[in-house]
Image (cartoon, rainbow, N blue to C red):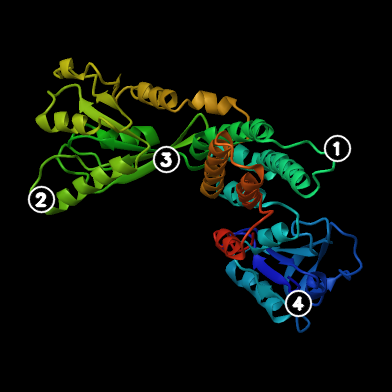
Amino acid sequence: MNDNICAISTPLGVGAISIIRVSGPQSINIVNSIFEGKDLTKVKSHTINYGFISENGKNVDEVLVSVMKAPRTYTKEDIVEINCHGGLSTTNKVLELLLTNGCRLAQGGEFTKRAFLNGRIDLVQAEAVGDLINSTTEEARRLSLSQIEGELSKKIKTLRKKIVELLANIAVNIDYPEYEDAEDVTTNVFKNKLEPIIDEIKSILLTAKDGKIIKDGINVALIGRPNVGKSSILNKLLDEDKAIVSNIEGTTRDTVEGTISLKGIKFNFIDTAGIRKTNNEIEQIGVNKSKKAIQNADIVILVLDYNEKISDDEIKLIESLEKISHFIFINKNDQPKKIDLNNLTDQELVYGNTVEIDGIKMLKDKLIEKFNINKISARDFTYVSNARQISLLKNSLGILNELRTQVLNNVPVDILEIDLKKVFDLLGEITGETYKDELLDELFSNFCLGK
């Protein structure tokens, strides 16, 4: 990391301001070589300096240059940020001058990668930076910010501290049995110290589902036979004409998606093609996509028509949802009742319509109830929401549960020590205290270029 990197940190396009970020040991000197104004090598750290970017004595743009000296920077290296006028031509020209004067173009996420490698943040915090950038709801923002502030990292580090203390006592018992100040780690002592660690990991994993909901949202599939009003429901939820609505059966041939926020949680709705038997090849493709959407959804809403009798196809559809999380929305309850509800006594039913102002309020309320959204919003935000982190915690828990079994079978403590070290390393991978280079390359490649 002795080279100097640069990248455009703001979206390219027409705008008032663009920011080009530079980081590295020679970043101040490099920017100073193309800057007309104060000598940037002599200005105080964390100051903004007015001047011009120039090439061969000709001004390229009027700029403000922020100088931030190591180690009090994002990467813990010298950082310079050039605030120039927005626009493709000007921004790219400034970037070009940096590249021809000693910088190389940063890889995706390389600034954050340097922040991690230089000890500015740990891996949980680094991943949370990416999540914060991509957050689309207030709850997702709060979750990411909590992780950036290190709340989850503190829990993981506390667990590792408990494990290392146990490992240290075991090592002393084995290597220095005559050392009287060390606790004698019997299998019973080992088990007693193991239980709180297992309980804490279980507690963290219990938040995983809520964390995923906050971060990724909830996928909801709207299904039903043609003309029950699925597209109208989607449009009503989104408050826009996203899906085509018509009285012609089979109008929706493909899935149509839209997103809303309920209590700060993102709900991704998928309006599917009407499910029925059809000889139309194109419509059948849509039906197949609908069935796939059912499998990928977190919850399914089956829409029935209050003004129509339940068809044989709908009965089969209800039966197919037996093992899938779902409820039934009986639409068009503003019209005369023709539906027979005798066969739906074991189903969760919600009534509504797309005509009245609050016609789908009960549908929204049911979704909030099904996922305990009010409870999620009221909790603190020490959640684990990352698939990589969840996998490592589950692997750790699996080893710890096996260790518990081995303790009950009176396996010697020095044998148990081997697997306990594995757990210590797995937990270290969560925060990045132990890591593999290929993991970092994969993780940071998903970041935007200027971050």
- Asked whether 202 or 421 is in front, the reply is 421
Amino acid on which the number 2 mark rests in the picture:
Asn
Alpha carbon separation for disc pair 4 and 1:
70 Å
Which structural element holds mark 1? loop
Give the number of the disc on residue 54. 4
Q: Earlier in the sequence, mark 2 or mark 3?
A: 3
322 in relation to 419, above or below? above
**Could you tell me residue 221's position as x and y percent?**
32, 38
Q: Residue furthest front?
A: 178
Amino acid on which the number 4 mark rests in the picture:
Ser
- Asked whether 14 or 142 is in front, the reply is 142
Residue, x 14% and y 17% (percent of image)? Answer: 340
Q: Earlier in the sequence, mark 3 or mark 4?
A: 4
Q: Earlier in the sequence, mark 4 or mark 1?
A: 4
Tell whether label 3 touches label 2 (CB within 8 Å). no
| Residue 284 visible, this angle | yes
Which structural element holds mark 4? strand
Alpha carbon separation for disc pair 2 and 3:
30 Å
Q: Is residue 350 left or right of residue 125?
A: left
Tell whether label 1 touches label 4 (CB within 8 Å). no
Q: Which residue is mark 3?
A: 259
370 in relation to 415, above or below? above
Alpha carbon separation for disc pair 3 and 4:
46 Å
> Looking at the image, is mark 2 or mark 4 nearer the viewer?
2
Q: Earlier in the sequence, mark 1 or mark 3?
A: 1
- Structural crowding at the residue carrying mark 3, measured as other residues with C-alpha within 10 Å and reported as few (<14), some (14–19) or many (≥20): some
- Structural crowding at the residue carrying mark 1, measured as other residues with C-alpha within 10 Å and reported as few (<14), some (14–19) or many (≥20): few
Q: Which residue is mark 1?
A: 181
